[in-house]
Image (spheres, rainbow, N blue to C red):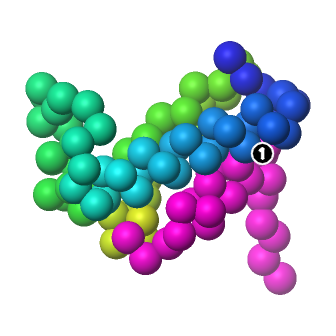
Amino acid sequence: MTTSQSPLRVLKAQASNIAHLLKVVERGDNVTEDAGGKIAASLAKGVAKVAIAMDEKVIILDIAWSTVKTSSEVALAEYVLKLMRGSRETSH
């Protein structure tokens, strides 16, 4: 289990894996057996819901499949990493 203070390389690896899986599903490749039909329902609904369990928090990521499609795997990984580290963007 990781925390927001875990080594950066560990958090980057996890974020990259999540981004990779999102892109694989978006392309229509088979990641795992979808016995409950949740992946198919998510694609039909247009929104992916991903839960990231960390030691001190659980991050629920709702992201549109259209965003996954138009974003690069690297950009998705950076976004997930920011969430995992607790970084917040400030608006002026």
Give SS at disc 1.
loop
Relative image position of residue 2 (x, y in whole percent): 73, 23
Task: Look at the image and tell me whether residue 30 can be seen.
Answer: yes
Residue drawn at (13%, 28%) of the image: 36
Which residue lies under the disc numbered 1?
86
In the image, residue 57 lies at what x, y percent? 66, 28
Residue 9 place in picture, x, y as percent: 81, 38
Where is 9 relative to 78, above or below?
above
Foreground residue among 91 and 16: 16
Image side of residue 79 versus residue 24, left or right: right
Question: Magenta segment range?
Answer: 69-92
**Which residue type does callout 1 highlight?**
Gly
Magenta stretch holds residue 35: no
Q: Which residue is drawn at 84% across and 28% down?
A: 6
* Of residues 16 and 54, the one drawn nearer to the viewer in this rendering: 16
Q: Is residue 78 magenta?
A: yes
Against 18, residue 43 (above or below) is below
* Among the 4 quarters of the image, the one containing residue 23: bottom left
Quadrant of the image containing the C terminus: bottom right
Location of the N terminus by quadrant is: top right
- 48 w.r.t. 51: above or below: below
